Image (cartoon, helix red, strand yellow):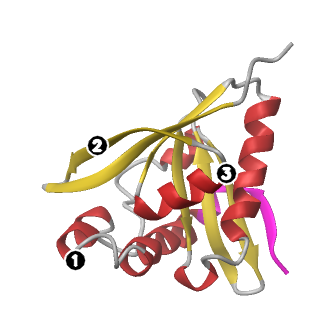
């Protein structure tokens, strides 16, 4: 049975593997091999760099096999990371993570969320009511990625 919980420092290795597999396998039909290799170069964390999710609100989904996905939101309402294992795509994992993230964003009083979405993420966020603000070619690690700047207005708190 799947559960969603807050991210912990000891989740870093599992998070790196979910990210690697989501990019290398899950995004294979949208990004070429060079793009995927630059985006997710290794299935291990970069231990020389701090863990960015420790400075964000981050949730993980797990089942009896371990972590199946994660989503993170920074303090300004930027949805930084949203990745699930290829074998659980379309099975409610992203939806459960998104529900936790959205509930927290509202509880924190955020009025607007933003994201730079990949092709796969764009489809998911559009189904959640996000607005496409612009398509943008994004340069990173020597590659150009077609990305989608999107936003969701949560409204202001009374």
Is residue 108 shown above or below 28?
above
Q: Where is residue 151 in the image (x, y as percent from the top left)?
A: 54, 35
Say which mark, if any, is on residue 136: 2
Q: Where is residue 47 in the image (x, y as percent from the top left)?
A: 39, 59
Q: Which of marks 2 and 3 is nearer the N terminus?
A: 3
Give the alpha-carbon distance from disc 3 to disc 1, as whole Å.
29 Å
Do labels 1 and 2 touch, CB within 8 Å? no
**Front: mark 3 or 1:** 3
In this picture, which residue range is highlighted in magenta? 1-11
User: Disc 3 or 1, which lies upstream in sequence?
Assistant: 1
Q: Residue 128 carries which label?
A: 3
Q: Which residue is drawn at 57% across and 26% down?
A: 76
Q: Where is residue 19 in the image (x, y as percent from the top left)?
A: 47, 68
Label 2 packing within 10 angstroms: few (<14), some (14-19), many (20+): some
Residue 9: say if magenta. yes
State which quarter of the image contains the C terminus. top right
**Foreground: 47 or 158?**
158
Which of the 4 image quarters holds residue 43? bottom left
Q: In which quarter of the image is the N terminus?
A: bottom right
């Amino acid at each position: 049975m799947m559960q969603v919980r807050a991210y912990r420092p000891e989740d870093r290795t599992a998070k790196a593997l979910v990210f690697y597999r989501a990019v290398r396998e899950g995004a294979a039909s949208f990004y070429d091999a060079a793009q995927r290799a630059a985006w997710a170069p290794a299935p291990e964390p970069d231990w020389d760099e701090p863990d960015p999710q420790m400075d964000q609100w981050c949730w993980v989904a797990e089942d009896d096999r371990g972590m199946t996905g994660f989503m993170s939101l920074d303090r300004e309402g930027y949805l930084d990371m949203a990745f699930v294992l290829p074998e659980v795509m379309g099975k409610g994992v992203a939806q459960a993570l998104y529900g936790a993230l959205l509930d927290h964003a509202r509880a924190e009083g955020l009025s607007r969320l933003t994201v730079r979405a990949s092709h796969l993420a764009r489809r998911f966020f559009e189904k959640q009511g996000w607005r496409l603000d612009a398509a943008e070619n994004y340069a990173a690690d020597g590659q150009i990625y077609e990305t989608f700047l999107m936003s969701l207005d949560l409204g202001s708190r009374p």
